[in-house]
């Protein structure tokens, strides 16, 4: 089983549970005031929840195709966990600007999925 499939599975399970649990969604969502109170897990946990089923399906579809391609690129690094490191760093890096711009809740997963897309485009299309 690839790391991409594992990430998709974990994300799908957490998102499905969060669709029906406001409490879980509130604990995972990116919310800058909570981060200032020490809830730094939100820099990563926000990537596990989605606004709705369409949002989840589109992002997991994108991640499946582009993630597998990038995973092959990173396989020689960090004992095969190079893609996981790339993915987590992309998730964190993509939300940092929002942490300074807004005091509102942020739900989107675009950052890491979009990073996978951009890297594949750069490697294979240019």
Image: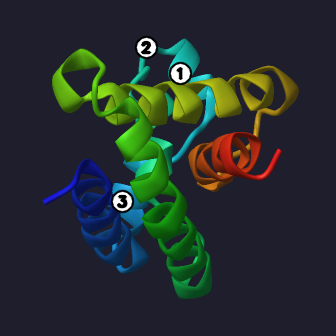
For the residues bearing labels 1 and 2, Cβ distance under 8 angstroms:
yes
Q: Earlier in the sequence, mark 2 or mark 3?
A: 3
Q: Which residue is mark 2?
A: 38
* Whole-percent x, y for residue 105 in the image: 67, 47
Helix, strand, or loop for circle 1?
Answer: helix
Residue at horizontal 69 percent and vertical 23 percent from the top = 96
Label ID, residue 23: 3
- Local crowd at mark 1 within 10 Å, few (<14), some, or many (≥20)? some
Q: Measure the alpha-carbon separation of dots 1 and 2.
A: 5 Å
**Observer-nearest of 126 and 101:** 126
Q: Which residue is mark 1?
A: 35
Q: Can you say which quadrant of the picture contains the C terminus? A: top right
**Observer-nearest of 89 and 73:** 73
Q: Measure the alpha-carbon separation of dots 3 and 1.
A: 17 Å
Q: Residue furthest bottom?
A: 54
Helix, strand, or loop for circle 3?
Answer: helix
Helix, strand, or loop for circle 2?
Answer: loop
Q: Measure the alpha-carbon separation of dots 2 and 3.
A: 18 Å
Residue at horizontal 72 percent and vertical 25 percent from the top = 99
**Can you say whether 55 is above or below 122 in the image?**
below
Residue at horizontal 42 percent and vertical 23 percent from the top = 39
């Amino acid at each position: 089983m690839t790391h991409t499939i594992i990430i998709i599975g974990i994300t799908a399970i957490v998102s499905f549970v969060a669709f029906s649990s406001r409490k879980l969604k509130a604990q995972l969502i990116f919310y800058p005031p909570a981060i200032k109170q020490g809830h730094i897990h939100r820099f990563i946990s926000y990537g596990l929840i989605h606004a709705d089923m369409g949002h989840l399906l589109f992002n997991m579809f994108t991640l499946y195709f582009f993630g597998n391609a990038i995973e092959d690129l990173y396989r020689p690094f960090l004992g095969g966990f190079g893609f996981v490191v790339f993915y987590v760093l992309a998730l964190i890096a993509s939300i940092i600007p929002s942490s300074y711009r807004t005091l509102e809740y942020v739900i989107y997963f675009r950052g890491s999925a979009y990073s996978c897309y951009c890297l594949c485009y750069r490697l294979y299309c240019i």
